[in-house]
Image (spheres, rainbow, N blue to C red):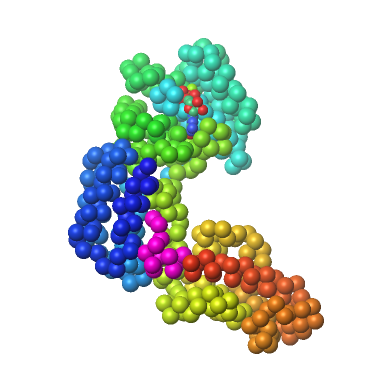
Amino acid sequence: GLTGKLQAALKKLTGKGKLSEKDVKEAMREVRLALLEADVNFVVVKDLVKKITERAVGQEIMQSLTPGQQVIKIVNEELTALMGGTQSKVNMAPNPPTVIMMVGLQGSGKTTTAGKLAGYFKKQGKNPLLVACDIYRPAAIKQLQVVGQKVGVPVFERGQKDPVQIASEALEFAKKEQRDIVIIDTAGRLHINEELMEELSRLKSQVKPHEILLVADAMTGQDAVNVAKSFDERLGLDGVILTKLDGDTRGGAALSIKAVTGKPIKFIGTGEKLEDLEPFHPDRMASRILGMGDILTLIEKAQASIDEKKAQELERKLREQQFTLEDFLDQLQQLKKMGSLSDIIGMLPGVDVQKLSAAGALNEKELVKAEAIIQSMTPEERRNPSIINASRKRRIAMGSGTTIQDVNRLLKSFEQFRKMMKQVSSIEKAVKRGRFRF
Ligand code: GDP
Ligand code: MG
């Protein structure tokens, strides 16, 4: 898939201390191939590769990253920008109900996604109504009813009546019943045709939706992009929901839609189940395509804040199991400089932020307490916390003006932290050795 190909192309760069223009060119040739193979629009690829190359060759030197890491960072940033940069939300009407019209080809996932969206809003405390305007197959109404029942949202239907008529009645009904979001499921066709566009245009001028969302099947690659373009030209779209982005689907459509149509992806469907809907975040998608989660951000932050010597010292101590409570205090203070502590810790795979913050390691007040507690310990206790028994705990609590529970909490977060720092240091080591697999 795209992820594997991009990883392979970029991996060659990560181990290098210095990048020549040739290195960059070669990597970019492979990046280009990987994108084209994933069915990203040709013009988009050309543009993207040009931008990345220009930036990579004229490197904005950043001391904390190797040139290889910098190229990856640039690729990541450009992919994010390509997909719109930031998250685009659904337009909410100032006076409810907000009317959302789902459009798209047959089989793209409109009915399923209408249900998913209704469930999504319901979870946010909204009061949605689903409207069955696909009147051509009786099974379509039934399907929407099943979906509605599963997410606990009522479905408005009037059988095979004119969809425009149904929609207007549904709006009246929604106002009367205080439904604040109306989601209209419409009919699709196998291909774009006049009849379909005509019906959708009539619907649009009658109900004046706040949001027209195209549902497009990611598995169709560039076809999805072309469909988006046509629908936007004929009907005007507010956004796209890209479905079937589960598993190993080629990411091509996700990368091209915004660039080609100017319309953002707002949600993605990642499975057949009704909870398989996620708001679309360009930065997360870029990282997902590059296959690296949030690790890159973590590396950046860590390298910017922990200076080299200290990091090495820390690493040695962790290796030799000499990481003491004094080091812990020092680290808490260092990490604080990086910004929100829980943000950073949240990026580490396998670290339970909730547990850690429940243990009290993450807030300012606890930090002051931690300092007092550690200062009330003997040097021996700081080096070897395992000797701290009940009577020592009592003494420490008294000395620091805290409670035994506070001391216990501190010791617990120290343990958590020790585990966490081990992870940080092994990530850093892997990066330094060029072993980190992007
Ligand atoms: P419509 O004709 O546009 O209303 O499409 P449907 O909602 O009937 O969906 C067509 C098929 O796609 C159904 O089998 C759905 O279960 C499936 N589907 C919809 N969204 C997704 C998705 O995000 N992932 C997967 N794997 N299947 C999906
Ligand atoms: Mg349908």
Q: Residue furthest top?
A: 160
Toward the left, the furthest residue is 22
- Is residue 420 rendered to the left or right of residue 389? left
Classify the position of the C terminus by image quarter: bottom left
Q: Residue furthest bottom?
A: 379
Residue 207 placement (x, y as % from top left): 46, 25
Q: Residue 143, position in %: x, y?
A: 56, 21
Does the rendering let one see residue 217? Answer: yes
In the image, 270 versus 434, the foreground residue is 434
User: What residue is drawn where x is 42% and y is 49%?
Assistant: 288
Percent coordinates x, y for residue 349 in the rendering: 53, 58
Name the side, left or right, on which 411 lies relative to 161.
right
Give the image quarter of residue 369: bottom right
Residue 409 placed where, x, y %? 70, 71
Image quadrant where residue 141 sits: top right
User: Is residue 12 depicted above or below 123 in this figure?
Assistant: below
**Which image quarter is the N terminus in?**
top left
In the rendered view, tell whether residue 317 sits above or below residue 265.
below
Residue 115 magenta-highlighted: no
User: Which residue: 35% across, 54% down?
Assistant: 76
Query: At x 45% / y 77%, what residue is drawn?
Result: 312
- Highlighted range, magenta: 427-438
Q: Nearer the viewer, residue 404 or 378?
A: 378
- Res 83 visible: no
Q: Nearer the viewer, residue 179 or 66?
A: 66
Q: Which residue: 57% across, 18% down?
A: 142
